[in-house]
Image: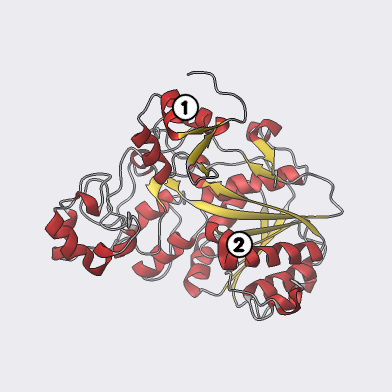
């Protein structure tokens, strides 16, 4: 590989030359989330030195199997609100962070937790109804993937009152009761631009008012032992009396492809296509989508969407064996976000969904098939939760195995 100047940002054609691929390949990788680009002053794609080195090492997704990751014991404790079916909780448990309380409003999600981990304290309740004063000063980590409704901005104060009526208000209220050492917020990448960035500004401002230093970063799950191109915004707040830096997981030099992820996956229930839709999806090759259909079929299948702008790359989408999965949604047969099996003409099954989210095969999901898909699709991938847990261990000075060496973590730079 040719030498690249440290911190240099290169245009598409130069990045392609260094990686020994075509410019079209670079553009395709960027669209699929396999290489990260930034925008130049004229809107052009630019690629950093570090990103080119990562891709040069990674190459295509490997057949390296995913596995359950575990860390040495610790005495750290956590509470999680909006916990869902336990992806983050299980990941943090694997990082040896002991859950003291899990709360969610969805009955099926709590049933899932209770039947898989009956000794965990999992309750079905609204955060509007609970009080956590009894945990004050006893919890190391408080986590939550709170929904992000728009906030008001009366008086431009960007303070606690501006979040009233939202679930973040309740999350902040409970943080103020517990006073954990670390606060973890998890959300979709789009939160950064929600309401022109004002929503995130309110969240950061309020956490700072509650006594926390705050940093945030988008983590790419496909580079953290998850066979799925999934980006999540992670917000860390560390209490101001704790002098440790804030750390985020460093991306690995490999990804895991779908072939490895689904090897020997158990049989399970799943949605089915109608005969008409199956006939259409039969025409789509592995890794293809609606543009691979004959023009007349495109128009009939797409309907009014055919004439709309945008790539619409999720429509009639068949996954590829040789790459990580696309981001899982709550419905694998939804027309806008199709998740068709690479070889068989059918949506991914429940257990295939769970594998891609790195749940163990013995983690059973309660409720109807549609509820199970929703629980899995909304979950934090378990292995991503593990790496997030390691970062928080590092912040609290808890020893770990080699995966927790300083070289494996990097302070967030803003």
Q: Residue at x 47, y 41 (%)?
A: 45
Answer with left or right where residue 403 lies relative to residue 154. Answer: left
Mark 2 or mark 1, earlier in chain: 1
Q: In this image, 280 relative to 375: left or right?
A: left
Tell me which colouring the rendered structure shows: secondary structure
Note whether 239 is above or below 390 in the view shown. Answer: below
Residue 342, image x, y percentages: 26, 46
Outermost residue to the right = 241
Residue 151 lies, in percent from the top left, at 64, 75
Label 1 crowd (10 A; few <14 / some 14-19 / many >=20): some
Query: Which residue is painted at 35% across and 44% down in the image?
Result: 262
Identify the residue at horizontal 27%, vertical 50% (top origin): 318
For disc 2, the marked residue is 119
Q: Position of residue 180 (x, y in %)?
A: 77, 60
Q: Residue furthest front?
A: 42
Q: Secondary structure at mark 2?
A: loop
Gap between marks 2 and 1, in whole Å? 45 Å
Q: Which residue is mark 1?
A: 56
């Amino acid at each position: 590989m040719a030498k690249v100047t440290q911190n240099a940002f290169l245009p598409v054609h130069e990045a392609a030359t260094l990686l020994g691929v075509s410019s079209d390949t670079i553009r395709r990788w960027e669209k699929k989330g396999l290489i990260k680009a930034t925008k130049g002053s004229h809107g052009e794609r630019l690629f950093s030195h570090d990103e080119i080195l990562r891709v040069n090492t990674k190459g295509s997704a490997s057949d390296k199997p995913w596995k359950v990751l575990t860390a040495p014991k610790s005495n750290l404790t956590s509470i999680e609100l909006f916990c869902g079916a336990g992806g983050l909780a299980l990941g943090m448990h694997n990082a040896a962070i002991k859950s003291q309380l899990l709360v969610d409003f969805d009955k099926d999600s709590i049933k899932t937790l209770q039947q898989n981990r009956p000794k965990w304290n999992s309750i079905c309740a609204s955060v509007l109804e609970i009080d956590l004063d009894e945990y004050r000063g006893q919890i190391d980590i408080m986590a939550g993937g709170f929904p992000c409704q728009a906030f008001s901005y009366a008086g431009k104060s960007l303070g606690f009152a501006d979040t009233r009526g939202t679930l973040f208000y309740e999350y902040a209220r409970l943080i103020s009761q517990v006073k954990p050492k670390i606060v973890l917020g998890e959300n979709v990448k789009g939160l950064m631009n929600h309401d022109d960035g004002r929503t995130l500004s309110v969240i950061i401002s309020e956490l700072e008012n509650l006594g926390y230093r705050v940093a945030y970063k988008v983590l790419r799950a496909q580079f953290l032992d998850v066979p799925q191109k999934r980006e999540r915004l992670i917000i860390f707040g560390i209490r101001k009396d704790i002098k440790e830096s804030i750390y985020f997981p460093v991306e690995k030099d490999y990804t895991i492809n779908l072939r490895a992820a689904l090897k020997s996956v158990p049989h399970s229930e799943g949605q089915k296509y109608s005969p008409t839709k199956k006939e259409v999806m039969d025409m789509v090759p592995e890794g293809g989508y609606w543009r691979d259909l004959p023009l007349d079929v495109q128009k009939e299948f797409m309907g009014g969407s055919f004439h709309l702008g945008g790539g619409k790359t999720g429509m009639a989408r068949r996954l590829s064996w040789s790459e990580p999965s696309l981001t899982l949604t709550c419905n694998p047969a939804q027309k806008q976000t199709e998740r068709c099996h690479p070889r068989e003409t059918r949506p991914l099954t429940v257990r295939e969904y769970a594998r891609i989210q790195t749940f163990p095969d013995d983690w059973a999901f309660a409720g109807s098939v549609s509820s199970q898909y929703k629980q899995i699709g909304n979950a934090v991938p378990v292995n991503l939760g593990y790496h997030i847990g390691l970062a928080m261990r590092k912040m609290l000075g808890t020893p770990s195995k080699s995966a927790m060496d300083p070289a494996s973590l990097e302070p967030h730079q803003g």
